[in-house]
Image (cartoon, helix red, strand yellow):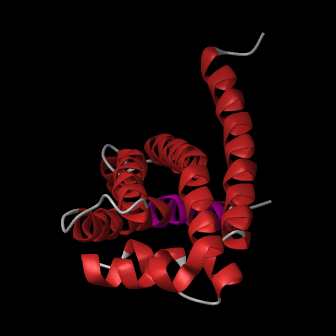
Amino acid sequence: MPSDSATVSLHRKRALILLGIATGAFTVILELIDPSHVSHGPTILNFEFAGSQSRAAQIVSEWGPKGRSAAHLSLVLDYGYMLSYGLFFALAGFAVRETARARGWRRLAAIGVVVPFFALAAATFDATENVALLLTLAGNGGIFAPPFAAVCSAIKFTLIGIAILYALSGLALRLRARLLQPS
């Protein structure tokens, strides 16, 4: 009969696989429906970092009706993406932390007390950013929503970048340890 830690590890692996597939699928879908493809204008990323009411209005105008519709769909579907990438990189971070503790990689284990939660925080900032962007897209964002969305976006990218680097660092160290292990 498998131990509790083996069962948890198996469940985590299955969850990581499913969340990884979902994250990959959302990445492709969101790229395919980016408003720039139908409007030949700015991307959704340009809209995230518009930073001012006038620049956001200019982007929305350049998109036209089809681009605005694509942007709205992108922002709504992005909530599923947030859930998948936030949970994926949080679970990956917890797995790295667990491996680091088991192998005596003290620094990586210590960093792992906090960094896996960065992925969840990034998804939260992403959700908040999208509220501001949806308000702006509907013409109700005023002067506050575009700069607020840009700040949330910058924080989101910083936090998820750190979470991704942590997961990749753990993966690289694990692969290195396997390669250096005598056969």
The residue segment tinted magenta is 165-177
Nearer the observer, 56 or 112: 56
| Residue at left offset 43%, top offset 56% | 134
Position of the C terminus, as image quadrant, is bottom right
Vertical position of residue 114 compared to residue 75: above or below = above
Nearer the observer, 60 or 96: 60
Residue found at the very far bottom of the displayed protein: 40
Nearer the observer, 150 or 87: 150
Vertical position of residue 104 compared to residue 60: above or below = above
x then y, percent, for residue 139: 36, 63
Q: Is residue 51 left or right of residue 126?
A: left
| Residue at left offset 56%, top offset 59% | 72
x then y, percent, for residue 62: 51, 86
Nearer the observer, 124 or 61: 61
| Residue at left offset 60%, top offset 72% | 65
Q: Is residue 98 left or right of residue 52?
A: right
